[in-house]
Amino acid sequence: MNKTITFIFLTLFFTFPTLFSQQQPTPEIFLQEPIVSVSPKLQLLLPNGVAIVTLKEQFSKTMVDFAMKYDFIDSNINNKIAFGYNFYRVFLGLHLYDIADFSEIYLSEEHLQRNKGIMPFGIINLGRSYYINGSLKFEDTITASLATSDKIDKGTNVTGKIGLLYDRLDENSKLPTGLKTSLDVEKSLPDMGSSYDYTQSELEFVNYFYPLKSHFLKYYLKVGYPVSPIHKPLTSQYRIGGYEFLKGYSYKEFYGGDALIYNNLIYHIPLIKNVEKKFIGTEIKIVTWNVFVESAKIGDRTIFDTTQDIKSSMGIGLDTSVTILKTLEMKAGIAIAQALESGHSPMGYFVLSAIYYTPAGSKNNGKGF
């Protein structure tokens, strides 16, 4: 079974670029030099009351990424910072993070999950949009009951990861194009002090299609497969539902799987036509709308053996954007999603975001990390 899954993953990774790369080709993006850019971004999401602040800073070949997320409803606090330097075709960096999550995940009781760690990583540009990446993660993880103060799971998670990436994706242009597919394999390292013993693989695929001018389809696929789930930290288990996966369900409605398969198809349609108005350096894009459908399933490795217990939802949404003086971009969107299962009411979402681009940089000034 493991050999079969591995063969399927490798087949998908190497054949998808061949099948789709000719539809909307985009040039390879190399880091420009010299360049100085700072791109702060603020994003607000309802009904969870999520605030996300990110800051991407680039000076010549040096990059700094900072991200902070707070979910008022789920009481999730996520802080990440990464540093990196580009040696032309080799990118080396260091990633630090601290994630605390208060959720009703076991027996409807409040629990605390926390991960904090450090992860050196590297990316090698193989040319022709192919990359290989590797990382070494040192992480402290804990899952504890807030009601009884019992520690359900606690340990040190030391893992090594290696991955392949094909990336010709350009989502920052006026009309997003290209595709991206990645395959990662992560293995715990007990010999280096890890309290856990497992091997996990993940496949991700994103592609844009243009059936009509200015109309595009975006397809996203994510597959997580536990190659050897002997002993994994509880904080690494998948959860679905809400604004991240399956919008027709409550946030994190389904939890506790080492395996995942998730599909998302979005059809982006301009209303009447994609009208733009420009005045005093301001560009206003008239409202467009999206139709989306998604499906997901989590569990153990047996989820790939049957089509039962697949959760699906579909919905519609409206969005618009305003760009001021080519540096400040503001976006707003609303969506309504319905689970394709009885007993669920429609879920509404609202997103507001603002991102600033320094005049010296551009939206396509290189690959982040």
Image (tube, grey):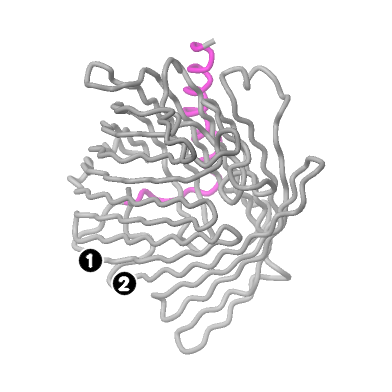
What type is the residue that disc 1 sits on? Answer: Val
Instruction: Tell which of 300 and 268 is nearer to you.
Output: 300
Pick out the residue farthest to the right. 342
Q: What percent of the width, then of the height, locates residue 67?
A: 35, 55
Report the label total: 2
**What range of the chain is rendered magenta?**
2-29
- In the rendered image, residue 217 lying in the magenta stretch gets the answer no
What whole-number distance in Å separates the C-alpha atoms at marks 1 and 2? 8 Å
* Cβ–Cβ under 8 Å for marks 1 and 2: yes
Task: Give yes or no for residue 3 being in the magenta stretch.
Answer: yes
From the top left corner, tell me how far across and down residue 266 is, in percent.
Answer: 65, 50
- Circle 1 Cα neighbour tier, 10 Å, few/some/many (<14 / 14–19 / ≥20): some
Q: Nearer the viewer, residue 198 or 88?
A: 198
Mark drawn on residue 358? 2
How far across and down, in percent of the image, does residue 262 sit?
60, 36
| Corner quadrant of residue 348 | bottom right
- Residue occupying image coordinates x 68% and y 50%: 292
Determine the residue positioned at 20% across, 46% down.
88
Residue 369 x, y percent position in the rendering: 32, 48
Q: Secondary structure at mark 1?
A: strand
User: Which residue has dot 1 on it?
Assistant: 36
**As drawn, is 359 to the left or to the right of 252?**
left
Residue type at tag 2: Thr
- The crowding category of the residue bearing disc 2, from other C-alpha atoms within 10 Å (few below 14, some 14 to 19, many at least 20), is some
Q: Tell me the residue at 55%/44% (across/down).
A: 207
**Residue 111, placed above or below residue 213:** above
